[in-house]
Image (cartoon, grey):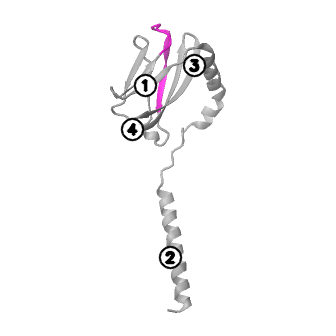
Amino acid sequence: MSWGYRIFILYTGFVAGMLFLVYKCVKEDVDLVATDYYEKELKFQDQIDRMNNNENSGFRLQISFNAETNSIDIEYPANEPGKIKGEIVMFRPDNSKLDFKIPVQPMNGKQVISAATMAKGYWRIQTTWEHGDTPLYQEERIYVQ
């Protein structure tokens, strides 16, 4: 076999490899963290204020995964019905289709969220809540098994 054929085979293999990589990259699903991240960026100072309120007020949530009951347990610092309201966002960084929201509904200072339907793996729990008139925000990372 002459050098011309070898160069042709090498070049053809390189082009085929590059086309295959382009095909794989086009098929890759790219999720943004949020579809409305520009609006969220403009409101980020509110988020920082909520986080500072959370650190300074002592109203820190205790969030943990309970493997025995396959649930996420959230303990609220104050047991005052009607004074606590807000929203919990269950955020999955690698797949935005699994994200969901639930309202803050403490019963006797505790809220239990079933993890039976949640995909196993890494989750961020983003809690935006209010205790009376104090706006608060807390984010915790858990691993659902």
- Looking at the image, residue 119 sits to the left or right of residue 88; the answer is left
Q: How many angstroms separate mark 4 from mark 3 (CA)?
A: 28 Å
Badge 3 crowding class, 10 Å Cα cut-off, few under 14, some 14 to 19, many 20 or more, is many
Q: How many angstroms separate mark 2 from mark 3 (CA)?
A: 58 Å
Which label sits in the foreground, 1 or 4? Answer: 4
Q: How many angstroms separate mark 2 from mark 1 (CA)?
A: 52 Å
Which label sits in the foreground, 3 or 1? Answer: 3
Instruction: Name the foreground residue: 46 vs 126.
Output: 126
- Determine if the magenta segment contains residue 78: yes
Instruction: Look at mark 1 in the image and give the residue it sits on.
Output: 102
Badge 2 crowding class, 10 Å Cα cut-off, few under 14, some 14 to 19, many 20 or more, is few
Which label sits in the foreground, 4 or 2? Answer: 4
Q: How many angstroms separate mark 4 from mark 2 (CA)?
A: 40 Å
- Determine if the magenta segment contains residue 25: no
Q: Earlier in the sequence, mark 4 or mark 2?
A: 2
Instruction: Look at mark 3 in the image and give the residue it sits on.
Output: 136
Q: Amino acid at mark 2?
A: Gly
Q: Earlier in the sequence, mark 4 or mark 3?
A: 4
Q: Amino acid at mark 1?
A: Ile
Please give the range of residues in magenta: 76-90
Circle number at residue 120? 4
Instruction: Look at mark 2 in the image and give the residue it sits on.
Output: 13
Q: Earlier in the sequence, mark 2 or mark 1?
A: 2
Badge 1 crowding class, 10 Å Cα cut-off, few under 14, some 14 to 19, many 20 or more, is few
- Looking at the image, residue 99 sits to the left or right of residue 49; the answer is left
